[in-house]
Amino acid sequence: MPLAKTTFLIIAGLTLAGCNGSDSTEDIQVQERSPSVARQWNEVLLNAIRSDFARPTIHARNLFHISSAMYDAWAILHKDATPYLAGATVNNYQCDVKGISATTDIKFQEEALSYAAYRLIDHRFFRSPGAVETQTNVTNLMMQLGFDTTNSATDYENGGAAELGNYIANCYIEYGLQDGSNEQYGFNNQFYLNENDFIEPASPGNPNAIANNNYNSWQPISLSKSIDQSGNEVENTPPFLSPEWGNVLPFSMTQDSSVTKIRNGNEYKMYFDPGSPPFLGTGSSEFYQWNFALVSMWSSHLDPQDGVMIDISPKTLGNNPALPSTNSLAAYQQFYALNEGGDSSQGYDENPITAQPYQEQTVPRGDYVRALAEFWADGPESETPPGHWFVIMNEVFDHPLFERRFAGSGDIIGPLEWDVKAYFALGAAMHDSAIAAWSIKGYYDYLRPVSAIRLMADLGQSSDPAEANYHALGIPLSDGYIELVNSDDPLAGTQQENTGKIKVKAWRGPDYIQDTSQDVAGVGWILAENWWPYQRPSFVSPPFSGFISGHSTYSRAAAELLTRFTGSAYFPGGMSEFTIAANEFLVFEKGPSVDLTLQWATYKDASDQCSLSRIWGGIHPPIDDIPGRKIGKIIGNNVFDKATSYF
Amino acid sequence: MKNLKKQLSIVFLVVALLSCGGSSETTPSIVKAPSPAIPPVSTKPVLTFSNQTNALNIKVNHSNALQQFLTEPMLFSAGVAVADYNNDGYLDMYFVAGSGGTNQLYQNQGDDTFIEVASEAGIAISGVKGSGPTFADIDGDGWLDLFVGAVDDDQYYLFQNNRNGTFTDITTSSGLLMTAANSVSSTFGDIDNDGDIDMFISHWGNPIASDKSLGIVWRNDTHNYVIKFVDISSELGMDTLYQGQIVDTSFVPSLSDIDSDGDIDLLLVSDSGKSKVLRNDGNKLTRTNDISVNDQFGMGSAVGDIDNDGDMDWYVTSIYAKASNSQSSNNTTSYNGNRLYINDGEGNFNNSAFVKRLDNGGWAWAACFADFDNDGLTDIFHVNGWGQSGLDFSQYQDDISRFYLQQNDGSFKESAAEVNVNEVKQGRGVICNDIDRDGDIDIITSNNDSNASFFRNELTTGHHYLTVQLQGNSPNTQALGAKIQVTPSTGSVQIKELRVDNNFVSTNAVEAHFGLGSQDLPVNITITWPNGVVTEHSAVAIDQLVRLQQPKQ
């Protein structure tokens, strides 16, 4: 490998001089090009995702296929690597490639890779709302790299690297048309129907679920009417995104880890079945009530003015002990801190890289949890959770202390080889995570906290039969967090219309925010029927069921993969940081009130904090979180093993 | 190490030279240097259209008096047909004007002017919700007869050509006794291989009942120029075609020999319930079990060999998702648009509309295949639009017509605005024919509750063409079902079928137009006539209209 590096310096000059007679020196350092061409395409792809609809399943697939196509274009020209799809048969799809021999010339690999990425990104995003911007970005990068976008030929046997790249892209396009995603018909659902009608958060309670007598099924969220790009007022009740994603062809997962279940006469293929979540009205009611009451209680932590200060450095946060071994109330009670928030983090005595203790960083809890919730929101205009882990991985690779040694040992690998392999592996992990998590989401069809908290409150309180408004399936009372409205309560109303209802101490919701750059909704007592998650009112909760958490699955899978790939559980230097500027970072409302820095010692710590952020953000209870982490752990390791078998 | 380095650099030097186009020698594997980012010099003729509606004095204003009680057929009907009804060699135009107007016949004077002669011709139908006119030589006398459909139980008409520029209404004596309220689109072809052409009519909205014929296929039993039709839909085994539906949802019948076995098969574009492929096996039309034919709301139809591989492909227009607006809460997120069914050579189809980016045509209606820029590649034009302010689906009111220009690599470039056919109307019918006989394909649109439009093709010089008309032996004087193969000295072989192409309520003139690109030498033509006889015509001069005669039996 080091040999090829020096060789190319001469060749590039010759090629250019031979063709147009100009003497060019700019390409001389091509082998050492850093960031690599793969990285440049990855950045273009992440931007394309940011300007598309926030569809984490679809973008996990995009990230995998485009990364894999780049890897293939590189690997098929490399003597020591095996491509994934190019020249192979994957899941019964054959991508025949004949007569290609390896080259040590990185320029050809770059060219093939660029055409593959260009064609595939162009195809995958041609109907994106950001299509014009994405088309401009991909065309500009091709021009910058000196490649002709009008060459769409795939006849690589009579052509060259460009044609090979186009051919590989075409294989991925064709593979994608038969991979179960229903791409060519808009990824539309083919049989899923929601069992509960919508919930409209702007109106009190959850009348549709109550009327339907169904306390466990997902509900579409009816958002306030919004204005679309053409200036039209549009109805906005997004359908369930990807409930049939279990049918999509995976990378590492096999029949051994899947089961096929029938719900409403439709088959759902499910990977790593974690068993049922707790259902209200069954033997697991108490666990259900605890889970969703916890989400409401943690919402009370979103107050920067409550005087609670916590250390958010790795000295205190991170280094979780084992996850709850069973999905039971007792095991979860032990793992999560119901009242003060957070998990069983033990923190670290010292940074193992520097052998120094981590510096304490004490900040208002209300600032930390809000920043955390927004940092990991990964909603509209983001690169979505699978893309977020590509951003994190790129930052790791950019760290001055980071060395490109596979699994932490051996020779340093060139930037292009390193990036194509890393993207391939991480893309595969994200894709499998999406398939596994959404296969479970689709089958169990489990409701979000906004549905559960409101419907429990609509039923009543389940703590004291002697008290007002008792219902065994109601919300459990908890002093200081969830209480009954008494007649002398300010919430009782002028006609005492709210007396006997449930109130919760929680983030007060979008009604208290006129200007997100100036206003803070704050935490206070509100009627539980008006409970909102800490999200934008135009989003409320992602348009798919909660069980299991996609964030937990993606993040843990990525963390495991990064650990194996880099050979270290720790971020370079023993810690990664993300700086949050006071009164600038938050977009749901004004804040945070102080500067703070999100810090993680290990990839797993970052993943764990991501998981918790979803509880504070009001969109997942613990029962969504833990199975996601467990499945992510399996996927991350399986994908690493399988991906590296190609290297 | 040093030696190897030198060796490698030599190899790549060779590569660099090759990439500059210096040698035809091919070396294995990937040995081409990165392509320079220099765009090729364009020598292509420029394609644009000019709207000549006013200049040609075309004053058709379709109206179904929509201020009254509205029905869906009132909103989807309209129509136009182009044909040389008076055998003067020029293509004439007949428009349906709806219940609020009078149908019009524009007689082509051959000098880029038209005279409206519907009354003189005896086909000035007035105050009728007409739909889908179609010309065909039903009685085999060499003169085109005319069928005009209708909706909402309004009167349909069959006119026999009097061979003197006038027609006689023979509806009641013809045996065409259609019970369906709507006769939307029609076409003709010899389904039973008895030599005469039979009739096919779609009846969207016709209630399904047991023991009731669909009335879609009518056998031509004409003798001695006395036109007679008999409904043979049941005989052909079509009674269960729409089983499980409340109504027949057929919109367009298209006829093509999709399995290249020498007889015509029926492609029945159908709204909700998927379009139907019916193979002709001699005495039955048997529906294929082709799950790839999966359009949701088939509306328009275009048939032809779009990929130049020798078999007939099929474009079915439908509806593509569009965000609803404040006037209409109708959710269309699951509507996935047009289909381009690519034929595998044996009559099995695979949809490639998504990959080719031909699926999002709005609320699409009539479509046609034609080589508008004469480059030898088939392009697609279709109209669209639906809904009225305050009514359902009004988000489709401002749909823009689509013009998909096929590129050399088989992809399509949507160019409606670029070529000036980006019409925003309630487009229903489309005609694609070289009406001014200047060697390129013009476009006519027929629009519901609006004026018709005439877009003249202003293609600049540089590409060549050949238009072929066939004169068949009576009774199939139009040689419907014939196959025409054009073999240029360079470039692809092209095959076209002669059909009465109904695009949705609109029928093209029966002729085959071949774009030949920059190749300027005479071509060879092979005709497979409807009776199976093959004739060869070598070194036929191009850039002209040729008429070829079927050998007498």
Image (tube, rainbow, N blue to C red):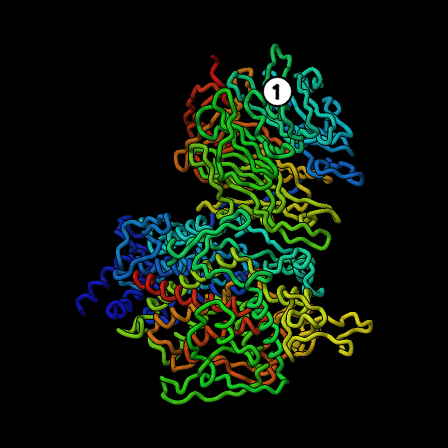
Task: Name, please, the residue furthest toward the front.
Answer: A466
Residue B383 found in image quarter: top right
Compared to residue A402, the image places residue A159 above or below, namely: above
Residue carrying label 1: B231
Q: Chain of mark 1?
A: B
Residue A396, position in %: x, y?
Answer: 41, 75
Q: Is residue A576 above or below residue A203?
A: below
Q: Residue at x 55, y 77 (%)?
A: A338
| Amino acid carrying mark 1 in the image | Asp
Res. A289 visible in picture: yes
Q: Whole-percent x and y of residue B287?
A: 51, 30
Q: Residue furthest right?
A: A495
| Residue B171 position in % (x across, y down) | 70, 19
Left or right: residue A644 versus residue B226 is left
Task: Give the side of residue A103 with respect to residue A295, left or right.
Answer: left
| Rendered location of residue B142, percent (x, y) | 59, 17
Direction top: furthest residue: B224
Query: In the image shown, does B361 or A439 lie closer to the viewer?
Result: A439
Please state the total of marks drawn on the protein image: 1
Residue B514 or residue A580, whichever sits in front: A580
The image shows residue B169, relative to residue A304, as above or below, that is above
Q: Nearer the viewer, residue B60 or B315?
A: B315
Q: Residues within 10 Å of mark 1 (few under 14, many from 20)?
A: many
Say which element carries label 1: strand
Instruction: Tell me if residue B112 can be seen.
Output: no
Quadrant assignment for the N terminus of chain B: bottom left
State which quadrant residue B77 falls in: top right
